[in-house]
Each structure stands twice: as C-alpha cells, then as structure tokens.
Amino acid sequence: MTKIPFLRPNLVKKEELLPYLSEIETSRMYSNFGPLNARFEERVLNEYFDTKGAVTTVNNATIGLILALSQVKRSKGKYVLMPSFTFAATPLAAMWCGLEPFFIDINQDDWCMNEKLVGEWLEKLDDQVAAVMPYAAFGTNMNLDFYRKIHESGIPVVIDAAASFGAKEGPDYFGKGFPGCIVYSFHATKSFGVGEGGLVYSANHEIIAAIRQAENFGFSKTRETNLFGINGKISEYTAAIALATLDTFDKKIKTRQQIHTWYVEELSQKNYIDKGWTLQKTCGEIPYQFMPVCCPQGERNDDFIRLLANQNIAARTYFAPSCHHQQLFIGYPHTPLPVTDEISSRIVSLPLWEEMTNQDVCLVVDGMIPS
Ligand SMILES: *Cc1c(COP(=O)(O)O)cnc(C)c1O
C-alpha cells in the first residue's frame, strides 16, 4: 500500500455542489454555454482579470491549446516554437493543427523556454514560424513582456499555462491583459480541478469569439458551419463544479502554499540546499500542483524516486523523459537541448496534496536521504 501517494485530488464535496445542481434541474439546460457556464465565465473575468479581455471554457486544456492555435496560427507557417520540457499535450496540439513542434532549450533557473534562443530562432526560421507556445513551468508567474512584444510584432503566442490558474503577482492574476492566448487546465490533478475542463483567456475579444465559435462546431449565428470546428464545450455539470470550486479556491491555494513552505523549510534545515539541491526560481504566489525540486548536478532523479518508492512514497519525474526523447516527437527539429537534458535528469516531483501534514512532508524529505 502507498503510504504517501503523489497526488490526492480533492474536488468540491457534493454538499457544495447541490445548490448548483438544483439550478440545472430548474433550467433544464445541460450544455451549450448554459446559465451556469455563463456565470462561471463572468465570475472568472471579474475576479481574475478585472473584466479586461474575454474568456471561454473548454472541455480540457489540450482542446484549448488546439483551438487557440488553430485560430491564431500564421497560415504560411510550419513550426510551433515550444520547450521540450513540457507535457506531451503541447507538441500534440501543434500536430493536431497540422504543424510541427520545434523544441527550444530552457533556462537553468526557472525551467521556462530560453527567450534569447526563441529570439534567435524566430529570426532564422522567419516565415516558417506559425506560432510560439511557451509553457509556464509548474504554474509559475512567467514574465510575459517578451512574448507580448513577439505577439504584437505579428507572431502569435499561445501560452500553455495548464497549472497557472490562480497564480498571482502583486495584485494581478497570471495572464491578465495578455493579447495572445492563455490556456489553463482544470484537470483533476491541477489545483483548480473539476475533473476535465479548461479555460482560454485573451485580452483580445475577437480571438476568444473565434475560439468559442470553433468549439461549437464552427457554427455561425445562423447555425451554419463556416469555420473548421469541433465540440469543445463543457457541460453544465462541469460548470457547477467550477462555480463551487471558485467559492473555495483561495483556501485551496493557501493550503498548497503552506505545504510548499514546509517543504522549503525541511529542505533547507536538512541541508539539501547546501548539498546542491535546487528549487525553481519563481515569483509571486503560485497554486502549487506538486513540489518540483532538482537533485544535485551529477546525481540522477531515478535513484531518489526508487529510494522513496521503497518507503511507499510515490514521486514522479515531470517532465522526464522530455518531449524530444519520446517516440512520437523524436523526429522533430530542435536546438541543442543541454539544459533540458540536465534538468530532466535531476527533476524530482514530490507529493503535494491538501491534507498533507508537516509530518508527511518530513517523511518525504527524510526519505530521500540514502541510508
Ligand atoms: C495538464 C497539462 C496539460 C493538459 O491539460 P488537460 O486539461 O488534461 O488537457 C497541458 N500542458 C501541460 C503543461 C499540463 O501540465
């Protein structure tokens, strides 16, 4: 039996859902951008984006990435610049749009795509670039100034912000005012978990209107298909869970941040940091999905995962193997990826779930000391 699982998703309880479910029984609307979906989108736009821009819900972030990319990609382009250090959904989204991933190396400190390299390859590849798709690694408040400039220069930017919903820097939630697309996941394993779901935000109303049409079979106002579409909508049941989750999300984030703080304290008190373990460089408040750390240079994450597994503690190595090593993506072009390879060999994703105690955190941290 697993003593400490990696994740233990904790979605809203049925009691918190009941009022919303009753509304569904009254409205008899079960999908198709119904009243609960409308209320959820309105609340998100008010509470997370100061009513600046527009949002649309999607049935998962992968569909959100595909739809966003399909609406903004440059028609003559072929490549989507993205990190290899991301989840498979990022390159898959490019491929579903008939494009090819082009993998770019990441930074040592924040594990996000290296902007200098992005700039260089944008110049080299020129018209062959269809879009740029950075990943805000592990929910971080990635600085978007560079990508805003790129987007405004005519190269569309879609941010994979799968784990960033609720990330905040100063008074602003992550993504607010960004003119490209920001795609968030509401998968059960993300901090704002509803089961399956997601959201696309943009400061640009027209982009969101196009995505909304595309996720509803490409229907025009007269229900005639005049855009290449699919069904990407959420049901009213999902919207009910999402509304109930909004009611408690701040508390969930605080709980996750407390557990993260315990990890940081234990790791430094037990001399991990002195011995070369490193944490992701981040800023602001993050709705931690799990606890990513890098073991010292020259050591291998697999050894620590095994050590933990022997004590019934489940840990992972997100995102190793990184995409360019996975069979489907091996043939696609990439820059040299020394940092991606190094971080992928060192990354250890430690358990983080809301009922974890300080004692659990101690067990995990102690569990990585070879006996
Ligand atoms: C979870 C995740 C996705 C996919 O989200 P779904 O809602 O499950 O489709 C995409 N990219 C990254 C980086 C993720 O972590």
Image: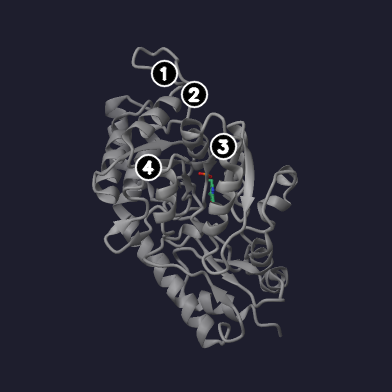
Q: Which residue is mark 4?
A: 201
Q: Earlier in the sequence, mark 4 or mark 1?
A: 4
Mark 4 and mark 2: span between their CA atoms?
18 Å
Q: Is residue 59 left or right of residue 285?
A: right
| Foreground tag (3 vs 1) | 3
Residues at marks 4 and 2 touching, judged by CB atoms closer than 8 Å: no
Residue at the spot of label 1 = 219
Residue 256 point in image, percent of width and height: 42, 65
Dot 4 alpha-carbon crowd within 10 angstroms: few under 14, some 14 to 19, many 20 or more: many
Looking at the rendered structure, the kind of residue marked 1 is Phe
Q: What kind of colouring is applied to the model shown?
A: one colour
x, y percent for residue 63: 51, 36
Pointer 1 or 2: first along the chain: 1
**Closest to the observer, 336 or 247:** 336
Q: Which residue is mark 3?
A: 127
**How far apart are the alpha carbons under marks 1 and 2?**
8 Å
Residue at 45 percent across and 41 percent down: it is 197
| Tag 1–tag 2 contact (CB < 8 Å) | yes
The residue shown at (44%, 71%) is 259
Quarter where residue 28 is shown: top left
N-terminal-most mark, 3 or 2: 3
Relative vertical location of residue 242 with respect to residue 167 in this rendering, above or below = above
